[in-house]
Amino acid sequence: MNPLFVGIDVSSRNNVAYLMKPDGTKHSSFSVQNNLGGTKLLSQKIVLALRSMQLCDVVIGLEATSIYG
């Protein structure tokens, strides 16, 4: 399994995402709003990253702040 790793720092207004290649190097990082539109954008960016690296698996970890996880 060679996954794309996605770390997400969750807060009330924005979610900050960090996408990491299977070799541990950075693919990208970005912030999206913590709402439906932001969630759609986040999922689109994950799918694009998977396709660009020809990967099938993704591992997602969340760092939740207070009640926002």
Image (cartoon, helix red, strand yellow):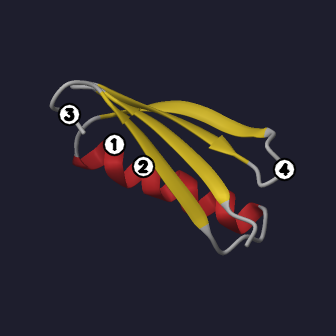
Q: Which residue is mark 4?
A: 23
Q: Residue at x 81, y 39 (%)?
A: 25
The N terminus, quarter of image: bottom right
Badge nearest the viewer, 3 or 1 = 3
Badge nearest the viewer, 4 or 2 = 4
Find residue 33 and report its horizontal and vertical position in percent. Answer: 32, 33
Find residue 12 and report its horizontal and vertical position in percent. Answer: 21, 25
Q: Disc 2 and disc 3: Cα gap in Å?
A: 18 Å
Q: Is the Cβ of the residue at disc 1 closer than 8 Å to that at disc 2?
A: yes
Badge nearest the viewer, 2 or 3 = 3
The C terminus, quarter of image: top left
Above or below, 63 against 59 in this view is: above
| Earlier sequence position, callout 3 versus callout 4 | 4
Q: Which mark is residue 68?
A: 3
Q: Which residue is mark 2?
A: 41
Find residue 56 and report its horizontal and vertical position in percent. Answer: 66, 75
User: In the figure, is residue 32 to the left or right of 33?
Assistant: right
Q: Residue at x 45, y 57 (%)?
A: 43
Above or below, 43 against 34 in this view is: below
Q: Nearer the viewer, residue 54 or 4?
A: 4
Q: Which mark is residue 38?
A: 1
Graded by Cα atoms within 10 Å as few (under 14), some (14 to 19) or many (20 or more), the crowding at tag 1 reads some
Find residue 24 and report its horizontal and vertical position in percent. Answer: 79, 43
Q: Nearer the viewer, residue 42 or 57?
A: 57
| Earlier sequence position, callout 4 versus callout 2 | 4
Q: Residue at x 40, y 41 (%)?
A: 62
Q: Amino acid at mark 3?
A: Tyr
